[in-house]
Image: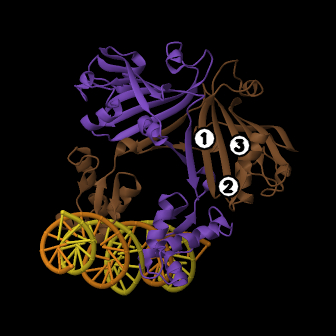
Chain colours: A brown, B purple, C yellow, D orange
Amino acid sequence: MSAAAVPLYEKVKHHVLKRIRSGEWQPGARVHSEHELVRELNVSRMTANRAIRELVSSGVLSRIAGSGTFVADLRSAGHPLQIRNIATEIAERGHVHRAEVLKLERLVPPEAVRARLKLRGRQAFHSLVVHYENDVPLQLEDRYVDPAVAPGYLDVDFLKVTSHQYLMAVAPLERVEHVVKAVVPPASVAPLLGLGAGEAALLIERTTFSRGRRASFALLYHAGSRFELAGVFDL
Amino acid sequence: MSAAAVPLYEKVKHHVLKRIRSGEWQPGARVHSEHELVRELNVSRMTANRAIRELVSSGVLSRIAGSGTFVADLRSAGHPLQIRNIATEIAERGHVHRAEVLKLERLVPPEAVRARLKLRGRQAFHSLVVHYENDVPLQLEDRYVDPAVAPGYLDVDFLKVTSHQYLMAVAPLERVEHVVKAVVPPASVAPLLGLGAGEAALLIERTTFSRGRRASFALLYHAGSRFELAGVFDL
DNA sequence: GGACTGAAGTTGTATATACAGCCCTGCGGA
DNA sequence: TCCGCAGGGCTGTATATACAACTTCAGTCC
């Protein structure tokens, strides 16, 4: 570090962000080129390049090779939200996580599930687990697993290891797809979450991929009154 | 580009990812140092550094200065989800977006809203807008705005500009906070979304910040049967 | 008038080099 | 035996340099 605790490329980022936040550089407007930043701030081009590149990857700017750098249109920029591991989340709140296994079996899954998993064989493993936070049911995990990916799934002790953890260990995770929606849970689900009739649930549908194949499909039901997703988008 | 279409630093990233995905390098395991990568792949250290730095920023690896680089524990990694602008989303589906303004007024907001906005004055601007996709109601936008931030809010034509767009133009966006939950909407909301009694809604609570102050607080209700958030997490 | 050409500007990538600061280990002295 | 310190390895940052590929625009030629 030549002079201060804050790196030079951070100063360059700040220099650009200041002009964007003040409204001086509107969305769509052209940002000073790397060479201009080099002259203005007396840094090397590589330093300016790193600063700009990081602002691009965070969605603040967009670049066109050979043409220039522009302020991204924030109206269309997505704001990220985090879907976190349920056990970790509970632990971080300082509460106790406990799981209860209701089903652990091999079966021929419903057609909707078959389509999502693109199964080769006819059968799949199926587990139904309730996750409790301080003895209050928080999540119902209804999961289907491709036997070709995790042959030992039925022998796992899900009281000690979450199925997500087990799958991670057996079949390295490559990709996760999520869909989040609000539903009134089916009658078979509501009582397991301690929900009265007509109460809403947040449903996360999670598909995981491993070694180029679909590994598992999970329906994660959460009590609407006790569960929420939170996210912050800065700059 | 010296040789191939795919940049060198991408090859370095692939080199590392391949070992992680194959299970050769488990979470927590130490990854080859930059110098080792330089020797293995015959690249410069700056190239190896860029590759590793990008893998760190995407959450695949974690580094400890002076110590080493390690495979991140994916079990605790959050998977990102995108909250997008409603008008853009509808447009990208090739459908028609239309807004209907139900209320546009100045009032003393409910205590819960006051607390969220940390208002200085007693009054706030309030707008209630329904967003339609091909004439089907998709989102009810119940928004409170700090008059100090957007004094001209009541004079805006929200049929032509979304309130989000207007606020962006007037007061540059610095930060957005989101909370997503599933609810059964109040009786005043359900009919506006074309929901029958007992149907679920996805509620996004959005707080925006500008120039260090809270600018607006919005309750965005979506018909649970017609709206979902989707996200993909790769690697 | 329209099409081609070339120069200037811009981003994208890659390298060699340098030094600061942190972590860990092992050696030597008390 | 235990403490302290030096050195080696690692990450973090910064620079100067180089070339490739793309865009834009002005100027020229047909």
For residue A217, above or below residue B164: below
The answer to whether tags 1 and 3 share a subunit is: yes
**What's the residue at 49%, 75% (across, down)?**
B34
**What's the residue at 49%, 68% (across, down)?**
B52
Q: Tell me the subunit letter for badge 2.
A: A
* Disc 2/disc 1 C-alpha distance (Å): 15 Å
Q: Quadrant of the C terminus of chain B?
A: bottom right
Which residue in the structure is indicated by mark 3? Answer: A218
- Of residues C8 and A4, the one nearer the viewer is C8
* Disc 3/disc 2 C-alpha distance (Å): 12 Å
Secondary structure category for the residue under label 3: strand
Foreground tag (1 vs 3): 1
In this rendering, position of residue C14 left or right of residue B73 = left
Which residue in the structure is indicated by mark 2? Answer: A209
Callouts 2 and 1 close, C-beta under 8 Å:
no
Callouts 1 and 3 close, C-beta under 8 Å:
no
In this rendering, position of residue B162 left or right of residue A97 = left
Which is more N-terminal, label 1 or label 2?
1
* Disc 1/disc 3 C-alpha distance (Å): 11 Å
Horizontal and vertical percent position of residue B115 = 39, 23
The answer to whether tags 3 and 2 share a subunit is: yes
Q: Amino acid at mark 1?
A: Val
Secondary structure category for the residue under label 1: strand
Which residue in the structure is indicated by mark 1? Answer: A179
Horizontal and vertical percent position of residue B197 = 61, 14
Q: Tell me the subunit letter for badge 3.
A: A
Say if residue B199 shows up in the picture.
yes
**What's the residue at 29%, 55% (across, down)?**
A70
Q: Amino acid at mark 2?
A: Phe
